[in-house]
Image (cartoon, rainbow, N blue to C red):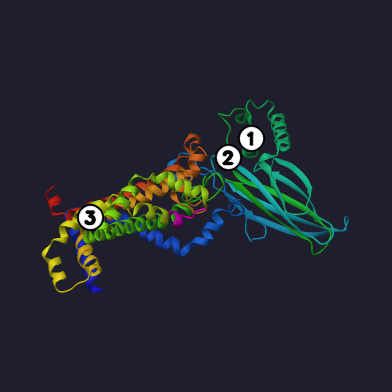
Amino acid sequence: MSIIIKNIGNIVREMARAYRASVIGLAILITLVCISIYTVIVYPYDYVVKIWNSQEVWQDNPRNALPSWINIFLPKKLPETIVINSSVNSNSVMKTKSFVSELGAYKIVIDFRIPYNYDDFPTGVRLSIIPRYTSFYPLASITWIKPDGTSYYIQQVKIRREFIYDISSDESLLRNVVESIEERVGNSIGYPITLNEALFAQEDHTILSKDTIRVLKGDYRVVVEAIVFDENDDIDAKLVIYGKVYGLAGTDHLRRDLLIPILWGTPIALAFGLTASLCIVLFQMIYAAISAWYGGLVDTVIQRLTEIMMVLPFLPIVMMISYIYRITIWTLLAIIIALSMLGSGVKNYRAMFLQLKESPYIEAARAYGAGNLRIIFMYLIPRVLPTVLPSIIYSVPDFVFLEAVLALLGVGDPLAPTWGKVLEDALNNGALYKGYYYWVLEPSALLILTSLGFALIGFALDRIFNPRLREM
């Protein structure tokens, strides 16, 4: 083990000496490996696949939200998502329950207090009310109160089961609020104002124009009052005010956190690229060595099979298989290896093995009685392996990009959160056309960064194992 570590250290030092940019490649690769280890430990694959394809998990996230760090570079502060739950102890919500003798019932008041100090309007408001009752279902009323004291009575509802109210899409409430604002201001609003804007805007002359409308900052209140008819009856409520930024990577059209596929795409990309590259090169070397050593009929069969595989249309075959069978990311990897292990590399390696076959050390091995398989696996392949190491490293990005391209074409695992899957969703939902550039740039940047890291390392290894390149 100490010898292996020492040899690796010597190779790293030689890489840094022969090609200094390889240090950058090593840094990129180490970073990607660390991200992969962290992701696999913190986010188990089965759990990630389950939540990634579940809508309920992401219902409290904003739709198509920018990454939160974008606020650092913007002149105005975009709103973050605010989630307040009455079942969780918080200074932002107060819940009381009292007996009302006149009604012979109990009154529950849930008072949400929302500090809103952002420079832009939210993208939505949703209120969920969960009742717990024995005989008679509760009656609840909802009131919206602005920081300046302006209040809007929203509605009264009978709650038989969980009540989910998308306040932002209530057209009747929008008409009532707009009429109240126009009556208070003394003029009509000259543009199609949204309910999100009306509920969070300053109610003065600035609201009359789209160019001058401003956010009213301060503490907003949403008051839920419910009447229950038994001492053990209760309700809880959750208020979600959807912002325009979320997390480190933003969200997609299904409110999913893009950090999940960004993180999990890293180990999948590395495993996919390294496994495909290593297996294909090893298989091609083995077939080439067998072909060169045995010659005759064996050589003819392997070469004809190689030529057949070289002319087969790779992409249509993969697409046909994916349309007939439901394949996973690892099944796709196996298909790619199977279709590529008799590629053009077999002919290149065969030419190298034909030269080595006549070498003196091979003749010596045959003289002391070494068998055919021993010569192939102990004398031929190990002699060539160091020279093909750079090509293994070089080809890793090819297969990483191949997975992304196949995902863009709808070929691959529909459940696995990968960089290619993110790009497919972005393309299908017009991310660039709608201005959601982060949705495309994040996975694209990681694809380019991965390719750059392996390219720098591969170029350095090429200089080490090919002395003629050292003089260039």
| Residue type for callout 3 | Arg
Circles 1 and 2: CB atoms closer than 8 Å: yes
Name the secondary structure under disc 2.
Answer: loop
Name the secondary structure under disc 1.
Answer: loop
Residue bearing the label numbered 1: 194
Instruction: Indicate yes or no whether the magenta region holds residue 329.
Output: yes
User: Within 10 angstroms of label 3, few (less than 14), some, or many (20 or more) residues?
Assistant: many
User: Within 10 angstroms of label 2, few (less than 14), some, or many (20 or more) residues?
Assistant: many
Is the residue 52 above or below the residue 79 in the image?
below
Mark found first going from the N terminus, 3 or 1: 1
| Residue type for callout 2 | Phe
Query: Is residue 216 left or right of 103 when viewed as pictured?
Result: left
| Residue type for callout 1 | Thr
Q: Which residue lies at the image location 48% right of the left edge and 34% below the top edge?
A: 433
Alpha-carbon span between mark 1 and mark 2: 10 Å
Specify the segment rendered in magenta: 326-332
Residue bearing the label numbered 3: 350
